[in-house]
Image: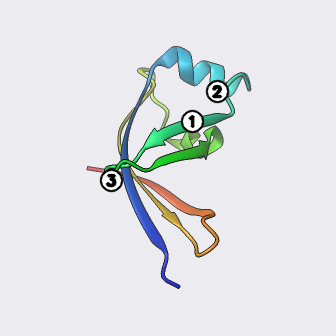
Amino acid sequence: MADNVITFSVSLSAEEVLAMYRGEIRRVMVVSDTGLRIDINAQHFMNFTTRQGIHGRFRIVLDSSNRLTRMEKIG
């Protein structure tokens, strides 16, 4: 079975990102461009942190077991 590619937008404030680093937020719920709700481990977002938080368009790749194999910022 082929990998599943899903795109979505995220806008997390600097305060929300700090809560992620402190372990207060462990999961981030996003809604894909097709309306699918996806619960993602907050740790996957850490590489995309700026002083303003985490903002932008992202793409995730899920394997045949729906496990996240890759996440990247797009656009």
Residue at x 49%, y 65% (from the top left corner): 61
Residue ranking furthest to the left: 75
Separation of marks 1 and 3 at Cα, in angstroms: 17 Å
Residue 11, position as x, y percentages in the image:
39, 29
Task: Tell me which numbered mark, 2 or 1, is placed earlier along the sequence.
Answer: 2
Task: Tell me which numbered mark, 3 or 2, is placed earlier along the sequence.
Answer: 2
Residue ranking furthest to the bottom: 1
Query: In which quadrant of the rendered view does residue 56 lie?
Result: top left
Q: Secondary structure at mark 1?
A: strand
Query: In which quadrant of the rendered view does residue 62 lie?
Result: bottom right
- Classify 10 Å Cα crowding around label 1: few (below 14), some (14-19), many (20 and above): some
| Amino acid type of the residue tagged 3 in the rendering | Thr
Residue at x 74%, y 26% (from the top left corner): 23
**Position above or below: 40 against 10:** below
The residue tagged 1 is 28
Separation of marks 2 and 1 at Cα, in angstroms: 9 Å
- Classify 10 Å Cα crowding around label 2: few (below 14), some (14-19), many (20 and above): some
Q: Secondary structure at mark 2?
A: helix
Residue 20, position as x, y percentages in the image:
64, 27
Q: Secondary structure at mark 3?
A: loop
Tell which of 34 and 45 is nearer to you: 34
The residue tagged 3 is 34
Residue ranking furthest to the top: 15
Residue 22, position as x, y percentages in the image:
72, 22
Marks 2/1 in contact by CB < 8 Å: the verdict is yes
Separation of marks 3 and 2 at Cα, in angstroms: 26 Å
The residue tagged 2 is 20
Residue 48, position as x, y percentages in the image:
48, 40
Residue at x 53%, y 37% (from the top left corner): 29
| Amino acid type of the residue tagged 2 in the rendering | Met
Which label is found at residue 60?
none
| Amino acid type of the residue tagged 1 in the rendering | Val
